[in-house]
Image (cartoon, rainbow, N blue to C red):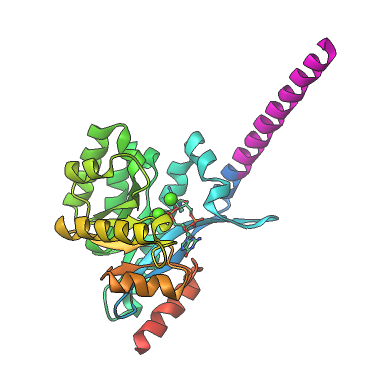
Amino acid sequence: AKASGRSTYKFYTSVLQAEVVGKLALEKELREAIKNEELEPWFQPQYELKTLKLIGFEALVRWNHPTRGVLPPGKFIDLAEETGLIINIGEIVLEKACAHLKTMQKMSSQSLKMSINLSPRQLESDNLVPFIKRIVTKNCIDPRNVVLEITENLLLQKTREVLDTLAQLKSMGIRIALDDFGTGYSAIAYLQQFHFDQIKIDRSFIQHAHENGKDIRLVKLMLGIATHLGMDIVAEGIEVNEQLSALRDLDCPLGQGYLFSKPVIFSDAEKLILKNEEH
Ligand code: C2E
Ligand code: CA
Ligand code: CA
Ligand code: CA
């Protein structure tokens, strides 16, 4: 029994060690990647559901790893958050997405929007507001076309400072969206504390919105709340035509998802804009 106890202990130690070593290696790689400009935003188009008119894009970060290919944020964003590297990554995404928005605006006859995800760490940083001011000015973009997405659980802590930062951004004209709506705690309470310009209905509600009566009623309820509070609403994760028509029947105004397009590199986003211009 003693021997097996020791080997169990040994086993856990080595698993832990492997985990720590793996994390350290990944952190080192991620630092290098930032320096080598291997991180960049990709773009997923958003549409007006009634007309299928393009209204803008959500920027989603990707890591062009030299040997492992294109890595989605699920592979590195938690570590980036833990190590604080998310601040650098967030600045890269903000910088590039806003520069690209400028180019997109020139190609498009209507004004397109750019949605950008913010992490909790970024919102706690004193540098965020001046940084955003600087890139908006530098690129001469209308701040009303920039949408910053934050998640519900972010509002659980640091309420005072975060609400201050959000208010400063709003006073510049920047729009604020509540991401993954419906998945966190007491979402409704947050809607009272802060006026969001947009809510994004989480994919988990959209998935069965064409076949499950309960989900349909929930989406309907969220649409009602958004309309009542004067917020825009975006349905996330529309994958099949049945979901699109169910959302249209509910008069859901905006949406995005694989049915329209996966996130794409900038040059492919340009093609989507040109296609939209032909209509
Ligand atoms: P999110 O903000 O909720 O983004 C939506 C995710 O769903 C994206 O995954 C997108 O590619 C994926 N998606 C879009 N349409 C569909 C669909 O029809 N079906 C399915 N199954 N998935 C769909 P992605 O790009 O892997 O990003 C995952 C998460 O990583 C994001 O969730 C966001 O929380 C975070 N993230 C992405 N980019 C950034 C960034 O620049 N900064 C920060 N802080 N977080 C980011
Ligand atoms: Ca998002
Ligand atoms: Ca989301
Ligand atoms: Ca999410």
Residue in view at x 71 percent, y 31 percent: 18
Residue in view at x 33 percent, y 69 percent: 247
The image shows residue 217 at horizontal and vertical percentages of: 30, 59
> Where, quadrant-wise, is the C terminus in this rendering?
bottom left
Chief secondary structure of the magenta span?
helix
> Where, quadrant-wise, is the N terminus in this rendering?
top right
Judging depth in this view, the residue of 128 and 203 nearest the camera is 203
The image shows residue 138 at horizontal and vertical percentages of: 30, 59
Q: Does 61 sit left or right of 2 as displayed? A: left
Judging depth in this view, the residue of 1 and 161 nearest the camera is 1
Res. 66 in view: yes
The magenta-colored residue range is: 1-29
Q: Height in image: 31 above or below 208?
A: above
Q: Does 194 sit left or right of 44 as displayed? A: left
Judging depth in this view, the residue of 185 and 87 nearest the camera is 185
The image shows residue 94 at horizontal and vertical percentages of: 38, 54
